[in-house]
Image: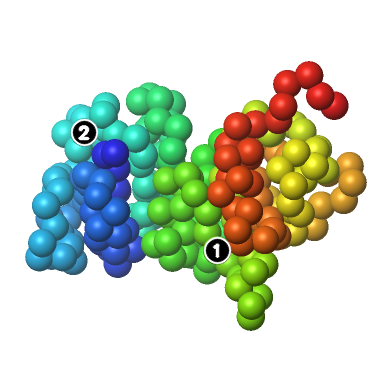
Amino acid sequence: MHVVIMGCGRVGSALAKTLEGLGHSVAVIDRDPASFRRLSPDFTGTKVTGVGFDRDTLSEAGIERAHAFAAVSSGDNSNIIAARVARETFGLENVVARIYDSRRAAVYQKLGIPTVATVKWTADQVVRRLLPEGLITEWRDPSGRVVLAEVAYSPRWVGQRVTRMEEEAGMRVAFLTRLGEGLVPHRDSVVQEGDLVHVSVEWDRMPEVERLLDAGPRAGEH
């Protein structure tokens, strides 16, 4: 897949390297051409000098064929504007914006744009939100039998009770991350758009759990 990154600072350059290492094509936008020196010498993607929320600049970076967009410049306003242009003008679903002010991050997330505050930032977290397939292992017990992992799930689970998700997938939801904060679910908790789901399950059942969560709730039940 093709990913467009706005901002070639430490995070943007690290993100570009990670995504290329995963086999994806990458275009990096920055208004300062000198910033491209942060990219690794073997970077084979596209370098575009310009403003990341300018439509012509985005088009030059290949936004029309992109599958994901990350706004990781040093400016909150630039990041959120660029993210909204990518989503609302070009129709991209996988969009993430870096926000320095964590208080504002929750507001923007309510607008449907996932955000990552600086204090929580790592390139891996951004990759996880751009490429949501699969899981992130967060903890394993000493025997390696039980795992705590963040898993992707079908949008069809949004609006469903967490207990239904547990019953149909045969696992336990340990906690949710909602608007950047942890939440321990109770029996009436409902999955909301943007929630990150962290499950506890036996390691050898993870492929089955991933498959069931990706399929969505079974029709005609509950």
Q: Residue at x 60, y 73 (%)?
A: 144
Q: Secondary structure at mark 2?
A: loop
Q: Secondary structure at mark 1?
A: strand
Camera-side residue: 209 or 138?
209
**Earlier residue among tags 1 and 2:** 2
Mark toward the viewer: 1 or 2 = 1
Is 65 located above or below residue 70 in the figure?
A: above
**Picture coordinates of residue 78, whole percent (x, y):** 37, 46
Q: Residue at x 43, y 40 (%)?
A: 95
Residue, disc 1: 137
Residue 110 visible to the viewer: no
The image quadrant of residue 48 is: top left
Q: Horizontal placement of 82 versus 211: left or right?
A: left
Camera-side residue: 10 or 80?
10
Q: Label 2 sits on what residue type?
A: Gly
Q: Residue at x 40, y 25 (%)?
A: 91
Decide: few, some or many residues near mark 1? Use Cα within 10 Å; few <14, some 14-19, many ≥20: some
**Picture coordinates of residue 87, whole percent (x, y):** 42, 31
